[in-house]
Image (cartoon, rainbow, N blue to C red):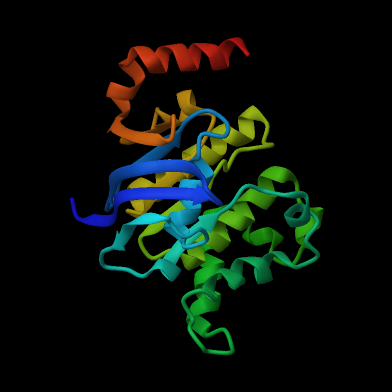
């Protein structure tokens, strides 16, 4: 597989407090990589560094065959996002801004791309609705369509099913599997719902104690430490 992203000896800190130290891993074209770990372990911080939202203290992040502004990003949903007073189609279309450069208008290709991605998400029929009037699951689908309008090869998702009911979460993961397998989109996803995510993931990047270790999904599932951690989640 072709390498898309390579993180070399990555150390990330806030002020003088080190969050992650000497992290090394790669992301390959077409794979489904889940980022797992306990709350506060640095998962979202790592994602922000890859997106260029947080500069590493030392080390490097290299991209192969695409640019950083061509990453599709679905962040954790906030109350501001849920109440955003904009139309569904406009929100999806705004995903084209990252890769449009200095062009001050949307092209026919941009509008077609927004239409295709809203259709893929099953929410094109809601295109004239106000975003704040949608259900939580519908909002996540619109925001995912927006992220797909930005993405060339890599889609980054930070806790994408947070706040969704179990049925909506399962439907969301089914959509992720389709996008990964049929659109050949590489997926990097932070999730607490690791048991369900492992059903589709190729590899897992486990973040703990200021470092990260990458393994296949099967190796991760069978490890003794993972069994303890997942058992603690199930008993919580």
Q: Is residue 191 left or right of residue 78?
A: left
Q: Give how far across and how far down residue 22 sits, in percent.
A: 33, 43
Q: Nearer the viewer, residue 229 or 194?
A: 229
Identity of the residue drawn at 69% across and 37% down: 163
Which quadrant of the structure image shows residue 214?
Answer: top left
Residue 198, horizontal then vertical, whole percent: 40, 28
- Above or below residue 139? Residue 177 is above
* Quarter of the rendering occupied by the C terminus: top right
The quadrant where residue 232 appears: top right
Between 63 and 57, the one nearer to me in the picture: 57
| Residue 66 locus on image (x, y percent) | 32, 68
Q: Residue at x 35, y 20 (%)?
A: 221
Q: Is residue 8 left or right of residue 161?
A: left
Q: Answer with left or right where residue 48 lies relative to residue 152.
A: right
The correct choice, above or below, for 138 with respect to 233 in the image is below
Which residue is depicted at the point 41% across and 38% down? 34
């Amino acid at each position: 597989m072709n390498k898309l992203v390579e993180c070399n000896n990555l150390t990330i800190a806030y002020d003088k407090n080190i969050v992650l130290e000497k992290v090394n891993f790669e992301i390959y074209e077409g794979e489904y990589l889940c980022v797992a770990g306990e709350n506060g372990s640095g998962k979202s911080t790592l994602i922000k560094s890859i997106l260029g939202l947080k500069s590493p203290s030392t080390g490097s992040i290299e991209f192969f065959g695409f640019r950083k502004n061509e990453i599709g990003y679905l962040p954790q949903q906030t109350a501001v996002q849920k109440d955003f007073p904009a139309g569904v189609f406009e929100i999806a279309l705004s995903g084209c801004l990252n890769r449009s450069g200095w062009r001050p208008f949307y092209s026919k290709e941009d509008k077609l791309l927004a239409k295709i991605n809203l259709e893929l998400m099953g929410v094109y029929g809601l295109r004239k609705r106000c975003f704040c009037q949608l259900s939580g699951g519908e909002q996540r689908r619109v925001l995912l369509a927006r992220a797909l309008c930005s993405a060339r090869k890599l889609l980054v998702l930070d806790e994408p099913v947070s706040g969704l009911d179990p049925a909506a979460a399962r439907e969301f993961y089914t959509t992720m599997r389709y996008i990964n397998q049929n659109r050949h989109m590489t997926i990097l996803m932070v999730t607490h719902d690791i048991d369900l995510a492992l059903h589709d993931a190729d590899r897992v990047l486990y973040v703990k104690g200021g470092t990260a270790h990458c393994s296949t999904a099967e190796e991760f599932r069978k490890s003794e430490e993972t069994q303890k951690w997942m058992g603690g989640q199930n008993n919580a």
